[in-house]
Amino acid sequence: MRKSFLFILLLFFLLSCTEEILTDPEYSDGSLLTGKLPIPEILKTRIEGIYKISDGANYFGNEVALKWRGKKLAVYGSKNGTYFLLNGATKDSVFYFEGTWRHMQSLNTGLLRLKINRANGALDIWQNSVTEKSVKLTGSFGVGSSPNTEILKLTYSRPLSNSTESKNFLIISHRGGVRNSDNIGVSENSIEMIGKAEELGATGIEIDIKLTKDNVPILYHDPDINLRLVQEAPIWGPIEEFTFSEIRTFLRLVNGERIPTLMEALNFTLTKTKLRFVWLDMKSDKNAMALVIPIQQEIMKLAKSMGRDLTVVIGLPTKEKRDFFMEYPDYQNIESLNEGTVEDVHKTNSYAWGPRWTMGTQTAKVEQMHSEGRIAITWTLDQIEFISKFIKKSKFDGFVTNYPTIVAYYNYAR
Amino acid sequence: MVKGSFIYPSEMKNGEYKQEVSLILAKLPEEQIEATSSWIYAPLFSYHAKYGLPYGFNLRGSASTNIITFYFKGGAQWGYSFNNVTFSVNGDVAYWFGQLKHFGFNSAVKAWSGYTTLSMGIAFEKFTLTFQTEANYLLSLTQTVDDIETNTGNNQNLLAGFGFSVFIEQPVWKDNFMTIGVKFNRAKYYWPAWAVFPSWDRYFFIPEVFVGFVL
């Protein structure tokens, strides 16, 4: 009996040690784009739109949204969180695209190449005469690091939704982008992740704020130092028991990045991205308001002076954090996001209300917020079926999500 | 040993009735609960019964709850014994439903699941050892959040998971048997954790510890 029980325990621990790692595949035959010219900015928006997928629909669904994100053409779909990130170039009027695809909800990834031939609408793009079915992207993709063997064909269907731009809907990516468990090769709550957020479809970010022992606000989610968030390190225990110098010296995030200070993260967001919204989720066990609010105010002031549309809100998730906030002088004139009740929002005069999505659309309360000049953002909405229905039925001004690619698709296709 | 055990897949006499109560404790994946401080979560209390039929068949049923979910499962098993080794195959269907109206939730769920299980039991002098492999299928899933309802077909999560279990059964006093076991699940959808609204199309490792008393 004792031996059998030990055998079971051994099995239990052996099978507990599982880890899934994903790395981006790369082309081994060089880039298709070598020797070609950048696509002129004026043409880029003419390529954007909603496209139907004929060949390749079993992998990527029936429809995707194409939207330029900086220098990359991003393709967002709903099936398993499909997205492509493509570099583009042009030569002899033909458009060439090359990059990777990924299913955010699984670990499926691969390479893909597409082009728009003259006969498939390239000239319509140059001549600004794109119409339904006039543009076709054709090419192939592979699964994993294998060569491109599957055919892919996208046909232009319609422009991106008009209401998308006018409504300024906020797609707020969780933990600066996505979670470590989503395996995109960049760590959550890092500068590098904030740099990826727009490619993933986000227009805002939610980041987690802790205080070091010497009162430096940093980005970190968990109470303790652990291997989910950082690489093996000589220091261990509650993160807030270590000084910033110790954290900088001894800790690296799981993908090798440094743990950023709040100031570094907000400066980067302001100067290196076009993100419009930052939700500071106050995770510190201590009262961090007197340290975080001045940084928030400084960044907002800088943004205003630069003519930059950027709102940074202090997240108030609990009664304790709301009490801390209300101890701060002139708190009613500081931009905050209150996760409590509507009455709590009134007490703190918050700029935004942030209920859990699992409470439903709460349309009457959202409309009340709007009538009071506030916005309402729900969190953390990840299930495809609910994202689709909340986009269609709710009146929220934005969602926090771990799948900004999926929200982006439904937002652009609404 | 065989007579007093419950999970051991022995052939039962026609009309024979056996029952067991159990407690299952599971460790949910960090990815789903978004923290590392997890160890044991959501105890699941169950009552199991089986009823002997001719030709090695028996009917099985169980009722389980983790407070926010109620789960009813029924099916049939066929077993064949060879010396002190018994093999069995069984098919089961479960209907389960739950709701959570606190802690920022206004959510409900109802679903059908299906199971196929292969078992091998070995009877030793003082205890029995049973190995099981199981595949489970999510046949339909209806989730509700306040005024919004979604119906997930069986295309994405048809094979919701599979598992491997090991159980030891032996008397602890007189003829009163106890079962101790572990189950290693690889699951896309783990029904006791429905309230976290899992969104992955990936299989996660979810270990369970099982403690039962044969009544």
Image (cartoon, coloured by chain):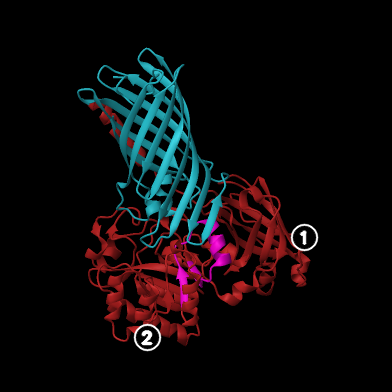
Chain colours: A red, B cyan
Provide the residue span drawn in magenta. A375-399
Q: Amino acid at mark 2?
A: Asn
Q: Residue furthest top?
A: B83
Tell me where residue A134 appears, x and y as whole percent: 77, 63
Measuring 34% from the left and 59% from the top, which residue is drawn there? A252
Q: CA distance from mark 1 to mark 2?
A: 55 Å
Residue picked out by circle 2: A333
Q: Is disc 1 placed on a helix, strand or loop? A: helix
User: Can you tell which quarter of the image residue A300 is in?
Assistant: bottom left
On screen, residue A49 above or below A102? below
Residue A374 coordinates in the image, percent (x, y) = 46, 79
Q: Which residue is mark 1?
A: A120
Q: Nearer the viewer, residue A55 or B59?
A: B59
In magenta stretch: residue B111: no
Q: Is the residue at mark 1 from the same chain as the one at mark 2?
A: yes
The residue sitting at 48% across, 71% down in the picture is A204
> Residue B198, can we see it?
no
B195 with respect to A62 (left or right): left
Q: Position of residue A167 (x, y in %)?
A: 57, 75
Q: Amino acid at mark 1?
A: Asn
Residue plotted at (52% across, 60% down) = B148
